[in-house]
Amino acid sequence: MNTENKSRWIVRPIVPEDVYTDREEFLEYFYNAALAAAGRRTMSTVLLGQRRMGKTEIFKRVVNRLFFEQDPKDPEAVVPVYYSFPDAPMDERKFGTDYLENFLRHYLAFYTGNPKLARLRCSGRELVAVAEDAVSAVPSAETLDRMIKTLRSLENGDSVLPHPDALDVPRTVSDVDDTTIEMIPDEIQNTRLPQYKFDIAGFMQNAVESPTCPHIVTGPAMSILTKEIIGRGTLFGRFDSEVTEAMSGYWGKELTLKAAQYYKAEVSEEMAPVTAEHCGGNPFYITAVIKQAAKLRKPVSDEKTLNENLAEDLSSGFIWGELNDQVTRWIERINEHKITKWILYLSAPEENEDKDKKSRLKLERIQSEIKRREGTDVPLETIRDVLIRLSRGDLLEYPEMGNWFLRVKDPILLEFLKVWGRIEVEGHDQRQVQDELADEYRNLRLRVSEYKG
Ligand SMILES: Nc1ncnc2c1ncn2[C@@H]1O[C@H](COP(=O)(O)OP(=O)(O)OP(=O)(O)O)[C@@H](O)[C@H]1O
Ligand SMILES: [Mg+2]
């Protein structure tokens, strides 16, 4: 890739261009939908998809393309603004200031043609000074002045309702100036974490409705959070939706081969599609297994070596790191950590349960196992309550129509939960569990792909 392309970013993607595979359909769709917003023909949209399927990578690429492929002097130009809802404690004022500063950075970067303004994340007084200097580049000095005043009142604590004030700025600007702004707020599920003690989605109603300023948001597919926020909650009826699925067999194989070349791992032509299939077509898992093969210098030449790499990664590598982090964060959000850990562990399939893998969870079994192993009596109601909370983190499914729980269709996550439980809940030695898992995988052909839902 040439250096010019390398520097054409406003929000930097993580995946190198040499590895990035497929998703063309989504990139085109969102790019064209954004441009169509200039003709007031685009509705706000939500991009759903299982965790780590590549939603954020799609958005970042769309934003970069919109930034670099348009002329800011064109009255039809669409200003792209990416924002990632932080997964960290914030109060209304901090959130409002952060949201508005981010908006202003992207807005000024676009109209002045200077991507560094967004990349370098200038803020506070410095950002205000940059804004004041940019008057001649933006469509209206008056709206710019209003933005600066709103930012000051947020920073000074003068604003009574800081978060709605900030959320409304983009649409106010595009409505008043009759320009077009495409807002791309990512990780909207974070707005429902306990650390946000104020309602964001409720106040977005007004913001997302303007045809001059459509919003594209992401959320996990199965989570009731998405259903609560978009499906029937405050934002109901205001969104179109798109879903990112697992990669197809063809693209999964392509990604395996590209990643192998980039990270210098050896994968035989025949094993590339098998690798992708074992990983359920999930690009993060595929990349993790390939990086592990490179790290261990273990060529993926047959099913046995593939499984060895997978076992290693699942129990101590990239997949372990990512899933352990997610699981730990969810558990910390629920009281009674010990019981929660047991319930999550026991929600994974039992050793001899493979054929029954799609069945509903048996709450009584979880109850009796906790009694047997921990000696604690846990009421079924508590188990139900914990399972509902876990479903918010997409760790299991809680279908709206029924009063039952199903396992997620993520073979690697289910395998991970078993390994994690042995180490973190039962307290076994990590190295020993790793060795056992490697043995198990060596002996059981196609073990993981059996779970494919
Ligand atoms: N098209 C792709 N080609 C190659 N690798 C990809 C692609 N999309 C995603 N990945 C890999 O998957 C990882 C996760 O991608 P991304 O962060 O975009 O997922 P996400 O759907 O936003 O996840 P989350 O639900 O956790 O927010 C990337 O870091 C990368 O390793
Ligand atoms: Mg994401």
Image (cartoon, rainbow, N blue to C red):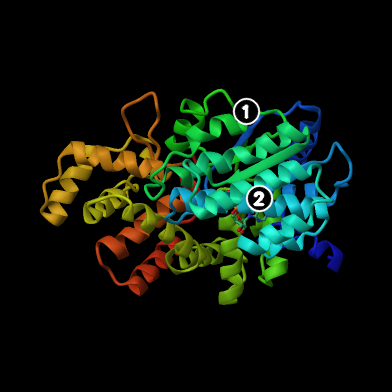
Tell me if mark 1 has few (under 14), some (14-19) or many (20+) residues whose alpha carbon lies within 10 angstroms of its own: some
Q: How many marks?
A: 2
Q: Is 363 placed left or right of 311 in the picture?
A: left
- Asked if one can make out residue 18 in the rendered structure from this viewpoint, the answer is no
Q: Is 190 placed left or right of 434 in the picture?
A: right
- Asked if one can make out residue 356 in the rendered structure from this viewpoint, the answer is yes
Of 254 and 437, which appears nearest the observer? 254
Measured as percent of width and height from the top left, residue 135 is found at 80, 51
Q: Quadrant of residue 26?
A: top right
Q: Quadrant of residue 167?
A: top right
Dot 1 beta carbon under 8 Å from ligand 2 = no
What amino acid type is highlighted by mark number 1?
A: Glu
Q: How many angstroms separate mark 1 from mark 2 (CA)?
A: 24 Å
Comes first in the chain, label 1 or label 2:
2
Q: Which mark is residue 209?
A: 1
Q: Which mark is residue 147?
A: none
Tell me if mark 2 has few (under 14), some (14-19) or many (20+) residues whose alpha carbon lies within 10 angstroms of its own: many
Q: Is 214 placed left or right of 96 in the picture?
A: right
Give the secondary structure at mark 1: loop
Q: Which residue is mark 2?
A: 148
Indicate whether 111 appears above or below 33. Answer: below
Q: Residue at x 38, y 56 (%)?
A: 329
Q: Kindly check if marks 1 and 2 are in contact, taking CB atoms under 8 A apart as contact.
A: no
Measured as percent of width and height from the top left, residue 101 is found at 62, 53
Give the secondary structure at mark 2: helix
What amino acid type is highlighted by mark number 2?
A: Ile
Q: Is 341 placed left or right of 66 in the picture?
A: left
Measured as percent of width and height from the top left, residue 200 is found at 48, 39
Q: Residue at x 66, y 40 (%)?
A: 170
Q: Residue at x 75, y 63 (%)?
A: 116
Q: Quadrant of the N terminus?
A: bottom right
Of 36 and 436, which appears nearest the observer? 36
